Image: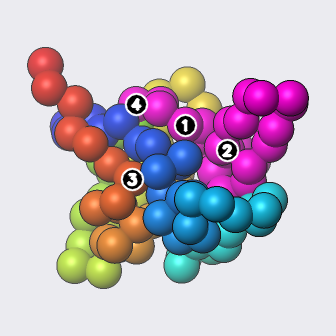
Amino acid sequence: MKEYTVSTATLFNALTGFDNEEEYVPLEYGGYIQKKTDGDKKWFDLKTDNGTPCMDGETCKLIEETENYVVLQEEDEQIPFKLSRKEFEIAATICVA
């Protein structure tokens, strides 16, 4: 099974621009990425109706892949989430064993 590191920060910035004041950005197949700040620290969580399936830099397993979308799941959270093919190509980097 293929594994990918998902950069929610990269995806957030690609969808909103790097100098933005947005706190969240919606994803094509539901859910959104939320930016949180604490002083100089920033972090980006992918959220869905089922919870927080992925945080920035986590490793996720490929569950399903089609021409239009990809379904991934982080090992600990076990909450599947769907990214469009474009979102996946921006955010995901394959893990090398």
Residue 86 location, x and y as percent?
34, 73
Q: How many marks?
A: 4
Q: Residue at x 48, y 57 (%)?
A: 11
Residue 97 location, x and y as percent?
13, 19
Q: Which residue is mark 2?
A: 45
Magenta region: which residues?
Answer: 33-59
Amino acid at circle 1? Asp
Residue 90 location, x and y as percent?
35, 60
Q: Residue furthest right?
A: 39
Q: Residue at x 45, y 43 (%)?
A: 7
Q: Is residue 24 magenta?
A: no
Q: In the rendered view of the protein, which quadrant contains the N terminus?
A: top left
Amino acid at circle 4? Thr
Q: CA distance from mark 1 to mark 2?
A: 6 Å
Q: Is residue 56 left or right of residue 70?
A: right
Residue 16 location, x and y as percent?
60, 69
Disc 1 + disc 2, Cβ < 8 Å: yes
Q: Which residue is mark 3?
A: 91
Q: Which residue is mark 4?
A: 59
| Disc number placed over residue 56 in the picture, else none | 1
